[in-house]
Every structure is written in C-alpha cells, then in structure tokens.
Image (tube, coloured by chain):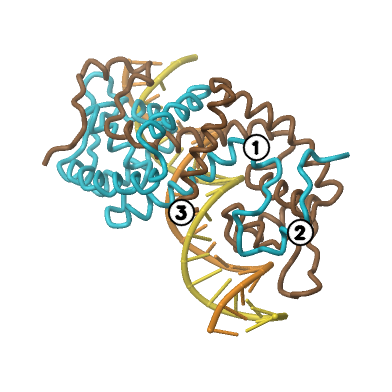
Chain colours: A cyan, B brown, C orange, D yellow
Amino acid sequence: MTIMVPATTNEMQLSDDVDSAVDLGVLRSFAGYHLRRAAVVFAANFANAMQTTKVRQVQFGIMSVVAANPGMNQGTVGRALGIQRANMVTLINELVDRDFIARNGSIGDRRVVSLSLTAAGEAALADCLAPIAAHEEAMLANLDANEREQLIDLLDRITAVSG
Amino acid sequence: MTIMVPATTNEMQLSDDVDSAVDLGVLRSFAGYHLRRAAVVFAANFANAMQTTKVRQVQFGIMSVVAANPGMNQGTVGRALGIQRANMVTLINELVDRDFIARNGSIGDRRVVSLSLTAAGEAALADCLAPIAAHEEAMLANLDANEREQLIDLLDRITAVSG
DNA sequence: TATTGTTATACTCTATAACTATA
DNA sequence: TATAGTTATAGAGTATAACAATA
C-alpha cells in the first residue's frame, strides 16, 4: 500500500531550525489545516490583546450581539453565534458576575430570559474595540482591503454549508 | 459612553426562527469572528468524517508530516505544526498505542526521539485520505478552484504574521 | 547553560444527556 | 409534546511550570 505523499529528501531533515521549510505532506493541500492554523494564531493573538480587559472571544461575541439586540432571548443569542444552550449558561453567568450583562425575566413567555448590557457592560464593550481593532490590523497586516473583504466572504460561504 | 454599534429595530427580535437575520453588531466587521466560526464548523465536520478511522485533526497532521519526513525529531514535527513539546508527548503516545507511529531512538543526539510511521500507520493514513477529501469537497462546495487557492493563500499570510 | 522529552496541571471550548418549569 | 433554561459531565485543544537526561 502506497501513500499519496510526495517523496522527501533526507537533507531537509537536517535544517531543523527552519520549520517553515518542513514538508507537510498531503496536509498542505487541505484547506482545513490552513484554516485551523490561522484560527489558532488569531485566537492566541486576540487573547493576548485582551489581557487587560479579560474578555474572551466568545464573550465579546455575546456582548456585541446583545448590544445590537437589547432584550434578545439567551437562546437566540446563542443560536446566532453557534453556541449551544447548555454552554450559554456558564458564559452568561460569568458576564453577569462581572456585571456586564443583566438577565431580565420576560413578561410574556416566562420560560425565556432576555439579555441586556449593563452600563458597565457597555463601557467594557467600548473598551474592547480599540484593542481588538489593533489586533485585527496586526493579524491582517499582509492583506489589503479587498483581500480582507474576500477573506470574510469566503469564510462565510464555508460556514453557510453547515452553519 | 456610547457604543459604536449600528442601531437595531426591535422588530428583528421577533423573528427568532431566522437566526441568520440576527444583527451581530461590531462583531460582523471583525475577520477573527468569521475565521473562528468557519474553523469550528470545519473541525466538527472533520470529526464527523473521521468517525470510522478515529483519527483527529491534529493526529492526522502529525501522521502526514511524519510520512513526508520519516525519522524526523518529535520536537521538529511539533514545531512545524505549531504544537508544543509538552502536548506532543500525549499525542504521540496515543499514536504509538495504536501502533501507527514508532519512536526510534536517535544514534547521534541521545536526547532526541525520531518518529516514523509503522505499516499500520501508513495504512491508516491512506484510509483517511478519501474521507478527508470528501469532507473538504463538502465544506468547500461553494468555492471554485481559484477561490480555494486564494483562501489558503490568505490564511497562510495570516498565520505567517505570528506563526 | 541550553535543549529534548517528559510529567503534571489548568483553562477554554465544545458536546451530550437529563432535569425543571413553562408553554 | 415541545421549548427555554439549567445542571452535570466528558472530551479535546492549548498553555505553563518544573524535572531528568543529555548536549
């Protein structure tokens, strides 16, 4: 049984200090690999940029959606972001503990919980914008405006397949 | 203090069943969000496609690199994939337990461990190729050949910034 | 001193099943 | 019966610190 991987010369293995020169094999042809690497690097840089505000990627997403849709149900916010009901509880609990988000009981359907930003939450969200913008600018430094637009477009068309 | 988020009409909140219509606020303009969503969807679909072979994304990456670079050091493989030394140990342990990878002591530097695929590992890697190709085709169904190439190019230029 | 592999550990994210209270 | 929120739990990925053996 043969593997569909290009052969590699043994000389390459000796230059251990240049990892970018390592032959990845079939992996290189799969978009999933490149997508995953970029997402991991992006997330790590985001976390680094948010060290002062202590707001994580998912939490910022929630706060952004709640800010744009005050009073929206907890489940609806989660569904918009691809977060499951069960996981929303802990995430919202953290934001409530920090007094960034308020759980307001709904008057009509007493099962649902509507979310809104507190004043502190709005301030925290605003404080995140500049660091995140700088983080994005750093990560996308090699891409011009058109390429950034196209990147988002391509990514959304992937997410749309099963998202 | 005001938030730089476009105002939202309350009517939108009533259409809960159409989550794609939810206003994401500033989140929508950040590439990191779209990157993360696509990566999560991609990873979930990958895991689903690999249910029979039980090979995970990272493990497939390791096997691909080892296949292309037989005898490469454990640390070098990890560095090429952005995996830390400490985490490589458990990952390789699993692959060794499944008899997919062999740890070969090196003759020169007695600290290093060189990795190679076993016959079973080569067979397992080959068995992964068709399911992964199908998975990639499904995820990239909305992208033509040029767009797929450009996607990988854009992602690599992001990773290159701090990867 | 520096590096390779290792161990231990913690945090985050995602997933599933089962419960409650409402509808 | 169906849904919203909740609880508990598990699995996977990543991160750091400290150690032994070796260079």
Image location (x, y in percent) of residue A54:
31, 53
Label 2, on which residue? Answer: B115
The subunit carrying tag 3 is: B
Image location (x, y in percent) of residue A19:
61, 57
Sequence-wise, the earlier of marks 3 and 2 is: 2
As drawn, A67 above or below A51: above
Amino acid identity at mark 2: Leu
Q: Left or right? Give the position of B130 relative to A106.
A: right
Q: Left or right? Give the position of A52 relative to A156.
A: left
The residue carrying pointer 2 sits among few (fewer than 14), some (14 to 19) or many (20 or more) residues within 10 Å by Cα, namely many
Say the numbered circle drawn on residue B140.
none
Say the numbered circle drawn on residue B162.
3
Quadrant (top left/top right/bottom left/bottom right) for the N terminus of chain B: top left
Image location (x, y in percent) of residue A102:
22, 38
The residue carrying pointer 3 sits among few (fewer than 14), some (14 to 19) or many (20 or more) residues within 10 Å by Cα, namely few
Residue closest to the eye, A140 or B89? A140
| Disc 2 element | strand
Report the Cα–Cα distance between label 3 and label 2: 27 Å
| Disc 3 element | helix
As drawn, A18 above or below B43: below
Report the Cα–Cα distance between label 3 and label 1: 21 Å
